[in-house]
Each structure stands twice: as C-alpha cells, then as structure tokens.
Image (cartoon, rainbow, N blue to C red):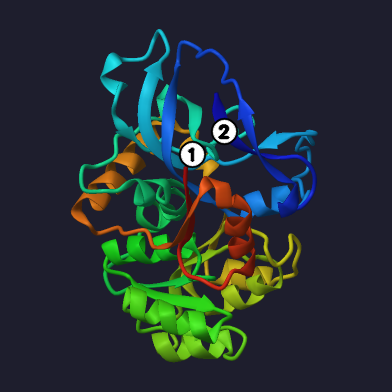
C-alpha cells in the first residue's frame, strides 16, 4: 500500500492521507520510493477549488509533479539499469495519473533523470519546474556579457533560477519584489546589486537609472496584466519580453507603437513547451544537471515537513513569507 496526499473537497483542511493500492505498472513506467517532493502555489490554488479553463473537477484528486527518490520496480520495456537508482523525474506532467505527493509513486520512465552524486533529494525535487521554466533566459535570449535582464517577482523559485541562468551568460540581473524584507534577503542570498521594491519604487525610473537610459535586453515576467506597458517602456531596442504567467490579469492595453518602434519580441511561455519537446528537454536537462553537479545551481530550500504535516506545509506556503521551496519528506 502507498500513502498519497489527496484532495477531498475545497481547502487545506480537506486534504487527506489516503492508503491506496498502486496500479500495476505499464511497460514504460517505474515505481519510485519518494524521498522528497515539492509543493507549489498552483497546487494550493487547486486545493482551494480553482481550476484552469477546461480542467476537469474530480471528487477526489491527487497532487504533485515534482519529486525525487529511488526506483524500486520497472515496467517490462524499461532498462534494468534504473533499478535502485536515485532519480529526479522531469515534471510537470499529469498529476492525476502520476501524482508525486506520497511515499510510493509511479512515474513515466521517459522522464527519469539520475540525480548527480553530490546533489541531495531535496535539491533534486526543487530543480525541474523552476530551472526549466527559466531556461529560455539561457537558450533563447541571445544575451551577451554585460546585458541587463529584468526578472519580475524574483524572489520566487522560478525567479531565483532565472537569476542563476542570467549569470551563466554574464548578464546583469535586475530583480523586482513587493516586499522590503524579501528584497534584503534576496540581496544577501544571491549577492544582487539591483533589487527594486515595486510597491515603493517606480520601475521605469529605476531601470533608467540602473541602465543609464539604455533599458534592459531581456524581461522575464509572471505578472502580465497592467505591468506590460511599463515593461515596454523599460525594454531596450530589440529586447525580448517573455510572459510566463498572468498573476496580474490576462488582459491589458499597451502601445503597439512601442512594440513596433523598438522592434520588440513579445512571447507567451509555458514550461510545457520545453518539457514536451524531447530534444529540447534532453538538452536542457543535460545542461542543468551539469550545473547542479558543479554547484553552480543551488535551489534554495525554505523548510521541510514530514508527510504527516502536509496541512502545516500548505499553510506555510499560503503565508508566502519565505524565500525558496517547501519540501515534503515522507
């Protein structure tokens, strides 16, 4: 029997630890003992009953798509080399079919990646969604050493990964956050020179000061909505703007004249675009694993909880008063 975290209604209090019989493995699947699993904000929204357009509503739902552990059984077509390996399956994927919040789970063999020897399970479980989401900064930005990268909401796990990836190119990160306390923490954690407190400082003015009026060459933004007009203002000629979220709303008005006049590229981005492309995913995974092994990438772990404190873990996540990720250790 396996223990899985499942949603039995709306709200954190409706989470239950259910004892379930795992199904028989398909030929291309493996069974994994979970050593660490990350909880995320989108899971919190799901727990509260929020659904994306077209997303199915189930009476009982499983959770999670980021975990690390040890392979204990393999399907018929899976290479035996994976048995006993420390692995970090590449997410996200369908958490109804492949949930990760539990002590024993099934994952698709095609997503298996061996954990580098010097990387622990908590860091492994905190890697894929943040670093793959931010990967276009490295792979699609055409940034040069000394260029500026504007990272909106840079205290998030994705924002911190974006800082690491920008620095690999020699680019200079400029990070925004609404919290003065988080700004101070992030400056110290990432040794940043440029952190803008967006609730207190004017973005356009600060970017002009930092870049001496030249603007930024790449913008990575999860907010969208009414922030976009300011982003067009601070972008340099030929800059790229990647929108990977709509936390500020899905609609806004902006100047097409600025977009055309500066020759800007405005792109919507989701991590699934990378994860579902086998070649692109393989290239990104190889690069990120190399950097993890070298210690160049170090996911920040805010706190760990045992599985039987899953309610406390999600309440901590809801407070959003920390830097880094929250990990469940069964």
Q: Is residue 324 shown left or right of residue 169?
A: right
Q: Position of residue 306 (x, y in %)?
A: 49, 50
Q: Residue, x 30% and y 48% (percent of image)?
A: 120
Q: Is residue 192 above or below residue 49?
A: below
Q: Position of residue 283 (x, y in %)?
A: 32, 39
> Tags 1 and 2 in contact by the CB under 8 Å rule?
no
Q: Is residue 269 visible?
A: no
Q: Which mark, by number, is residue 240? A: none
Q: Which residue is mark 1?
A: 91
Q: Is residue 11 shown left or right of residue 300?
A: right
Q: Earlier in the sequence, mark 1 or mark 2?
A: 2
For residue 52, what is the image quadrant? top right
For label 2, the crowd category at 10 Å Cα-Cα, with few meaning under 14, some 14 to 19 and many 20 or more, is some
User: Furthest residue to the top?
Assistant: 76
For residue 205, what is the image quadrant? bottom right
Q: Position of residue 86 (x, y in %)?
A: 30, 34
Q: Position of residue 258 (x, y in %)?
A: 61, 73
Q: CA distance from mark 1 to mark 2?
A: 20 Å
Mark 1 or mark 2, whichever is nearer to me? 2
For label 1, the crowd category at 10 Å Cα-Cα, with few meaning under 14, some 14 to 19 and many 20 or more, is many
Q: Residue, x 47% and y 59% (percent of image)?
A: 325
Q: Which mark, by number, is residue 3? A: 2
Provide the secondary structure element on which disc 2 rests.
strand
* Residue nearer the viewer, 206 or 8: 8
């Amino acid at each position: 029997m396996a223990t899985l975290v499942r949603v039995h209604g709306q709200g954190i209090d409706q989470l239950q630890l259910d004892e379930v019989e795992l199904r028989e493995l398909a030929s291309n699947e493996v069974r994994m003992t979970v050593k660490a699993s990350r909880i995320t904000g989108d899971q919190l929204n799901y727990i509260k009953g929020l659904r994306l357009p077209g997303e199915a509503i189930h009476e009982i739902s499983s959770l999670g798509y980021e975990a690390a552990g040890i392979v204990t059984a393999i399907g018929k077509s899976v290479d035996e080399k994976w048995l006993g390996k420390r692995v970090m399956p590449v997410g996200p994927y369908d958490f109804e079919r492949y949930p990760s919040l539990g002590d024993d789970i099934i994952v698709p063999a095609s997503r298996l990646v061996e954990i580098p020897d010097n990387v622990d399970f908590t860091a492994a479980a905190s890697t894929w969604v943040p670093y793959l989401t931010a990967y276009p900064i490295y792979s699609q930005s055409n940034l040069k050493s000394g260029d500026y990268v504007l990272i909106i909401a840079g205290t998030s796990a994705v924002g911190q990964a974006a800082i690491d990836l920008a620095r690999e190119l020699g680019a200079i990160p400029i990070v925004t956050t609404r919290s003065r306390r988080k700004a101070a923490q992030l400056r110290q954690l990432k040794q940043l020179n440029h952190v803008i407190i967006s609730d207190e400082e004017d973005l356009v003015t600060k970017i002009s000061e930092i870049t001496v009026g030249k603007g930024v060459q790449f913008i990575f933004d999860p907010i969208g909505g009414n922030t976009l007009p300011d982003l067009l203002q601070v972008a340099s000629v030929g800059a790229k703007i990647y929108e990977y979220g709509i936390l500020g709303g899905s609609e806004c008005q902006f100047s097409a004249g600025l977009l055309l006049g500066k020759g800007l590229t405005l792109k919507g981005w989701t991590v699934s675009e990378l994860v579902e492309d086998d070649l692109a995913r393989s290239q990104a995974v190889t690069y990120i694993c190399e950097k993890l092994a070298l210690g160049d990438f170090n996911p920040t772990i805010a706190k760990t909880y045992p599985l039987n404190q899953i309610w406390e873990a999600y309440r901590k996540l809801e407070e959003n008063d920390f830097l880094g990720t929250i990990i469940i250790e069964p």
